Image (cartoon, rainbow, N blue to C red):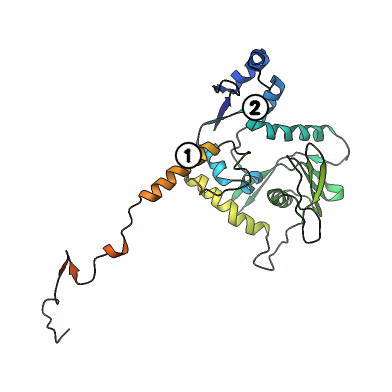
Amino acid sequence: MIKGFICERTGERLAFEDCLECARTRVNRKLDCPFDEAAIQGMIFHQQVKKDISVTMISGCHRGVFITRHYDYYVYPSQAYWAFRGQIAHTILEESEIHSDAIKEKKFVKEWQGIKISGTPDLIIPSQKVLKDYKTSKSVPSYLDKDGRIKAYENHRVQLNLYRWLIPHQIDTMEVIYFSMEETLICPVEIWPEQATRKTTMTVDRYLEENLVPLEMALASETMPPYQRNWSCDAYCDVREICFRELKKEITAARLRVVKPKNDKTKEGVKDGKDSGPEKGRTDAAA
């Protein structure tokens, strides 16, 4: 569970309230800290502990989810800034009144095979049957789909399809709207079919079977999920140091595991390096 921030200047581990007080009283200005109290407060708010299994967790790194729940850790404010930046865009969205029937950042909960799943879509417009998600990113996507259109990032496509299953509204159109420092981009997202017609076809049931079930089992049994490198490992993971530390332990344990070489197996009829000879009561003729 996250406990606080690591000071950007001194490396000291601080409780959230102590870091906020340092910024509020302007002590951090003497250290040339780049974060003021409003930014610190916003980043603290984003670090709320979630006890249920959310759409974001299912489509993200399961090992990271496990570590955040079972290990105490601290992060640098600069590590938390990317999420805070996205929060700013969501705040602007909340304050806008463009659609009279808009449902903005409302939490929904639904069960799949007895497992509760929660999710908070950014924007639902029921009258238009539209579902939207807003993302801030360093750069907008550039990969093209089979029709020559730019595709949303894979984990974002997954999130929208799970949101569509989660909410009690008919949705015919899904979009991810990206904001970078230089441009904005609208990416339509293809809706998964209800039933798979081919082995490669993704459906909600198939995705949850392959991803929700292992995550729920890992959390219930308190067993660390295996390491799988993904897009968040380098710059967007708050617990990568713990992850890599535990991975080294796992690799070391695997190397030290005693495995008998094949040529050490006791051959049939040989004991302690001596031929045991024919079984008692049997002759060569009988053998």
- Residue at the image point whose x is 69% and y is 34% from the top: 82
Q: Residue at label 1?
A: 245
- Residue at the image point whose x is 70% and y is 32% from the top: 84
Residue 208 position, x and y percent, is: 62, 54
On screen, residue 197 versus residue 224, left or right, reads right
Q: Which mark is residue 178?
A: none
On screen, residue 41 versus residue 104, left or right, reads left
Asked whether 264 or 95 is in front, the reply is: 264
Q: Which mark is residue 44?
A: 2
Q: Amino acid at mark 2?
A: Ile
Q: Amino acid at mark 1?
A: Arg
Quadrant containing the N terminus is top right
- Residue at the image point whose x is 33% and y is 56% from the top: 259
Residue 234 position, x and y percent, is: 60, 41
Marks 2/1: CA–CA distance? 26 Å
Residue 217 position, x and y percent, is: 52, 50
